[in-house]
Image (tube, coloured by chain):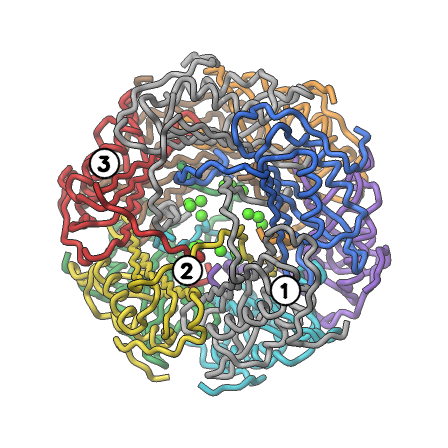
Chain colours: A yellow, C blue, E purple, F orange, G red, H cyan, I brown, J green
Amino acid sequence: MPSSPTKNLEIFDNPAPARDYQIHMEIPEFTCLCPKTGQPDFATLILDYIADEKCIELKSLKLYIWSYRNEATFHEAVTNRIVDDLVAVLEPRYLRLTAKFYVRGGIFTNVVVEHRKSGWQPLPPVDLAKFGSQPPIRE
Amino acid sequence: MPSSPTKNLEIFDNPAPARDYQIHMEIPEFTCLCPKTGQPDFATLILDYIADEKCIELKSLKLYIWSYRNEATFHEAVTNRIVDDLVAVLEPRYLRLTAKFYVRGGIFTNVVVEHRKSGWQPLPPVDLAKFGSQPPIRE
Amino acid sequence: MPSSPTKNLEIFDNPAPARDYQIHMEIPEFTCLCPKTGQPDFATLILDYIADEKCIELKSLKLYIWSYRNEATFHEAVTNRIVDDLVAVLEPRYLRLTAKFYVRGGIFTNVVVEHRKSGWQPLPPVDLAKFGSQPPIRE
Amino acid sequence: MPSSPTKNLEIFDNPAPARDYQIHMEIPEFTCLCPKTGQPDFATLILDYIADEKCIELKSLKLYIWSYRNEATFHEAVTNRIVDDLVAVLEPRYLRLTAKFYVRGGIFTNVVVEHRKSGWQPLPPVDLAKFGSQPPIRE
Amino acid sequence: MPSSPTKNLEIFDNPAPARDYQIHMEIPEFTCLCPKTGQPDFATLILDYIADEKCIELKSLKLYIWSYRNEATFHEAVTNRIVDDLVAVLEPRYLRLTAKFYVRGGIFTNVVVEHRKSGWQPLPPVDLAKFGSQPPIRE
Amino acid sequence: MPSSPTKNLEIFDNPAPARDYQIHMEIPEFTCLCPKTGQPDFATLILDYIADEKCIELKSLKLYIWSYRNEATFHEAVTNRIVDDLVAVLEPRYLRLTAKFYVRGGIFTNVVVEHRKSGWQPLPPVDLAKFGSQPPIRE
Amino acid sequence: MPSSPTKNLEIFDNPAPARDYQIHMEIPEFTCLCPKTGQPDFATLILDYIADEKCIELKSLKLYIWSYRNEATFHEAVTNRIVDDLVAVLEPRYLRLTAKFYVRGGIFTNVVVEHRKSGWQPLPPVDLAKFGSQPPIRE
Amino acid sequence: MPSSPTKNLEIFDNPAPARDYQIHMEIPEFTCLCPKTGQPDFATLILDYIADEKCIELKSLKLYIWSYRNEATFHEAVTNRIVDDLVAVLEPRYLRLTAKFYVRGGIFTNVVVEHRKSGWQPLPPVDLAKFGSQPPIRE
Amino acid sequence: MPSSPTKNLEIFDNPAPARDYQIHMEIPEFTCLCPKTGQPDFATLILDYIADEKCIELKSLKLYIWSYRNEATFHEAVTNRIVDDLVAVLEPRYLRLTAKFYVRGGIFTNVVVEHRKSGWQPLPPVDLAKFGSQPPIRE
Amino acid sequence: MPSSPTKNLEIFDNPAPARDYQIHMEIPEFTCLCPKTGQPDFATLILDYIADEKCIELKSLKLYIWSYRNEATFHEAVTNRIVDDLVAVLEPRYLRLTAKFYVRGGIFTNVVVEHRKSGWQPLPPVDLAKFGSQPPIRE
Ligand SMILES: [Ca+2]
Ligand SMILES: [Ca+2]
Ligand SMILES: [Ca+2]
Ligand SMILES: [Ca+2]
Ligand SMILES: [Ca+2]
Ligand SMILES: [Ca+2]
Ligand SMILES: [Ca+2]
Ligand SMILES: [Ca+2]
Ligand SMILES: [Ca+2]
Ligand SMILES: [Ca+2]
Ligand SMILES: [Ca+2]
Ligand SMILES: [Ca+2]
Ligand SMILES: [Ca+2]
Ligand SMILES: [Ca+2]
Ligand SMILES: [Ca+2]
Ligand SMILES: [Ca+2]
């Protein structure tokens, strides 16, 4: 499995383009460098999107995340840049990226950026009761 | 109890068709195969629906879920397909399927697909305070 | 305290009929029988309602719940029936019953049924920040 | 600190009357008596309000809560009465009291009562992502 | 699946009698009657044992639990009796039953009873670090 | 149910005096007065004991707890006194009382007192794996 | 790193002013003094904002928080003052500060203050399913 | 990555054979078949071991777990068999397998099996305070 | 209540010197200064002790903790110093202080220091089953 | 703050060498490379030690952890190597490192390595009741 970090994001055809449906991905392994100190920064990324014609391929997403390992970039800037890159290749109906950065200076910072396709409207939400989801075992 | 996996979903008559009410089912035992590698995939499925004239029979739902055990299918595709199958037999007023797939490549993926019956409108929600629900014992 | 199960639900006068306010009750001790197998079924019930002129008396509610102990009834049907019985005696402005049944066949089923008084409209909700509520001790 | 229970609620001037802002107080030490049996009842109270010209003084609130220690009163009635008393002295733009009573007869009861000042309208809510708030230590 | 409640506990051969190993079962559906009031009581049972030559068959255990549905018995007595019954058929090296009863009179009661085979000694424990066990999905 | 607070603790015969087994009771409704300020104090009590010939009767325990409602006593003293009273009537093989007092002055205080019958020795513990105990529903 | 407390809040250019996006900061180390008693008070602050042209610099925010260490101020007043100070330098589209004060007199107080730029309207929210975010390790 | 299920467990040299140290693995994707009904069974496996000269290779462990997908085997038997297989190739100083099976018949079953190398003694444990381990982000 | 910080710790007579019993106190409001940077440090302190003839008075403990507000001291040193001070006035049979410091440099540090009176031996522990302790309300 | 990764671990004098006391550090930002694939690996490290004459300096520990960012090393090997490095500079009485690696191949791996100074014996543990440690705010 010799792969390497890359800014190339690969896609595949949305198997259900007739529907607005949600894809949610949690990516816990983001790391980059701090432009001020050169020291490593870390974050967990949460990606939510409603695809239009294309979906993001999971392995290429992993390699793309890897590509930030040696780049220096600020919290607010990098979250916006990843959204820009994903929007450029996916052209999604909707996309939201939540970056949860590791504590710095005793302060915890999260950044939430979203993109909406021009002219796209979300369906009015159907409010149902929500229930938890434990595993069916005794832990 | 000699039963076998099947794509046949059995139904029964909705006992209260005059009302819009919610049925919620958590199905933790979904497994299929990965089309790329042939290796097993796993997910927990959460089904929520508002029945019209028919309700899904629990045991047949279990056998239907079993029928994916030897099929190769992608995350986004299989979630949409199960919704299509359930909608075909239930013709529900509303249905939502949430598939929470086991981690692959360090990334966690959930897919949420919903169907709305043409012309159906949800009642405006009544917002009440929500409270937790622990067991009445000391664990 | 020699009491016995009964379908008679007792009421008392709503002490504040001028207001729409919420009464929430968690009833963890529901059990009935499965019509297919005759075996016991169990559930936790959650009752939320906005009273009109009458409130439900707690002890009679407990005896009413007890009255299902030897009755055979399906999940979707019994939840709707309890709502019908409560609505008949309370004539509430709003009532919602959530029944969380114990796992069967590896599948967890919850049913949520609500009733709205004809012509009643909920007040527009006031959205406040929500906070948790731990006990003021160290456990 | 020789103080005594009292129904007198003391107030102070709202330091920011130009804004609608939320004050949230959790009061875990409420106890009164049951009118039927004379036995003690207990509850945790949650108070949320949007002040107009006055704010509630914390110590007097504590003494007011204490004043119920030897009074007999029902769950639904006492929650409404405390709201009436608070509204009388605070004349708030909005006030909500949530009383979570200790289990009785195996049933858990919560009561939620709110008051809105005549003519007051809440600002349309701004929906932001919500995040948890753990302590910055390792417990 | 027409079965009926029974005090007959069925067993099967321990597949690994050469080893002391632990079998843990959580049985959440215990209900009996209160000898004083005739009203239903409820509990969750936790069974842990180290088999000797026999293991308990799961379905017969369920029917045995069912057999208490119409019996009147006190908390401390019934927990000891179930241990006696299990020990009589299993003759285990070690057995422990934990009964967690639903709240009564505002007090929560658990009872823990164990049996040790005469002459049996547990192996000295090997203390390892313990880690939690969340599901491999995002809930 | 006209009962009144009392220091009389009632007992019943231990149904299984041949065994050392554990009885655990959680009593969340303790309140007394502070000797310094006269203000109410609150605590949750946890009682664990191994009975000898007698067990504590649940309702009388509740009335005994009630009897502290108008007594002034310090945290460390009252916890020891309750142990003395329980030991006097139960003469247990072992007894432990844990009192978790509500926060005072920003500090949380718990007190743990135990009694061992002269000459009694606990059985050497059998170390088994421990598992959690969630309810079999989806909350 | 010789720095000192200061009321000077430093800013940097918003890297994505074309978008409304959320910045969330948790600041657990707030302490000031109580104007009545002179004793220390403590709080955790939660800051959420939608920047316009400027973002808050993290280290200066920390020094600003430090500057309250020797100031006497009430809960409601200080929360409003910090909002005023942040609004003065950030001129944000939206800002919300949540102050969670440590328990005093057995009562827990939180204050939530928000500011909206004149003429600014939030985008209509896109309601997606929400999922938890555990670490990808076994703890 | 075309791999296939196999009973061959691969090993590598223990990099620190001079020390007794613990390796802990959580394997959530175990599935086999029920010998009675032919229906799928599921479990989460927890493996803890102290290596002697060999360590288990992670990918081969995954393929080994996969090899049970079409085998019919009982809970107690399969847990003991996996231990036998691991012991045969690893010859560990100590090994413990915990299998947490999905609920069947409303009952949750876990099985814990351990192996100790003949003559091996664990070091006496050093009891330290234990602390939780949350992620350094705000979730 | 005009009090001031002080290093004087006040005591009172142990009301039950005949017993070894545990007093546990959680003190969340510790703050001092960092000797390197002069910036504030924060910690939660957990005190556990077995008194001999004297107990610590709660209010004086609070004032003592306050006395560190303007002192510069390292994590390991201050935890040991507080233990020395407490031991000097209490002369306890046993005392343990756990200091959980707020995150610094992305690393979380806790320090645990204990003192044992010369010649004192703890009683051999009685191992009972442990159970959680939720509040008796629905939160 | 221009610092750089380094294998040099700096120390300072143990301020209380007369006592055996525990220092606990959680280090969530460990990342290295996988020797097989060259891809990044991640872990949370937990360090516990009982110092002899020296303590580890926090900032140098952070730079040491950083030094693994571009090194390829296996899970079991790197955990043992970090222990060797820490032991070489600290010469502690006791040291334990717990490495919790991010999920790979659907399997979660933790490694626990300890070192004991030759001739050092831990004090016999004093078993006290343990209590949780929530923040004194309402979250
Ligand atoms: Ca869960
Ligand atoms: Ca819950
Ligand atoms: Ca629960
Ligand atoms: Ca809570
Ligand atoms: Ca709690
Ligand atoms: Ca929280
Ligand atoms: Ca928290
Ligand atoms: Ca914790
Ligand atoms: Ca767990
Ligand atoms: Ca879990
Ligand atoms: Ca969850
Ligand atoms: Ca639990
Ligand atoms: Ca989490
Ligand atoms: Ca955690
Ligand atoms: Ca609890
Ligand atoms: Ca906590």
Query: Helix or strand or loop: what does disc 3 sit on?
Result: helix
Q: Quadrant of the N terminus of chain C?
A: top right
The answer, for residue J120, to whether it is visible in the render is: no
Query: Helix or strand or loop: what does disc 1 sit on?
Result: loop
The chain that hosts pointer 1 is: H
Is the same chain shared between marks 3 and 1?
no
The answer, for residue H137, to whether it is visible in the render is: yes
| Residue G17 quadrant | bottom left
Looking at the image, which residue is at 29% across and 40% down?
A: G97
Nearest to the eye among marks 3 and 2: give it: 3
Q: Residue E65's x, y, as percent?
A: 78, 53
J54 relative to E32 in the view: left or right: left
Pick the residue in front: C131 or E28: C131
Is the same chain shared between marks 2 and 1?
no
| Residue C48 quadrant | top right
Residue at label 2?
A: G135
Residue at label 1?
A: H102
Pick the residue in front: J69 or I110: J69
Hey, what amino acid is under mark 1?
Tyr
Looking at the image, which residue is at 61% across and 78% down?
A: H69
A78 relative to I113 in the view: left or right: left
Kindly check if marks 2 and 1 are in contact, taking CB atoms under 8 A apart as contact.
no
Looking at the image, which residue is at 30% across and 17% down?
A: I2
Q: Residue E11's x, y, as percent?
A: 81, 65
Residue at label 3?
A: G82
Dot 2 beta carbon under 8 Å from ligand 14 = yes
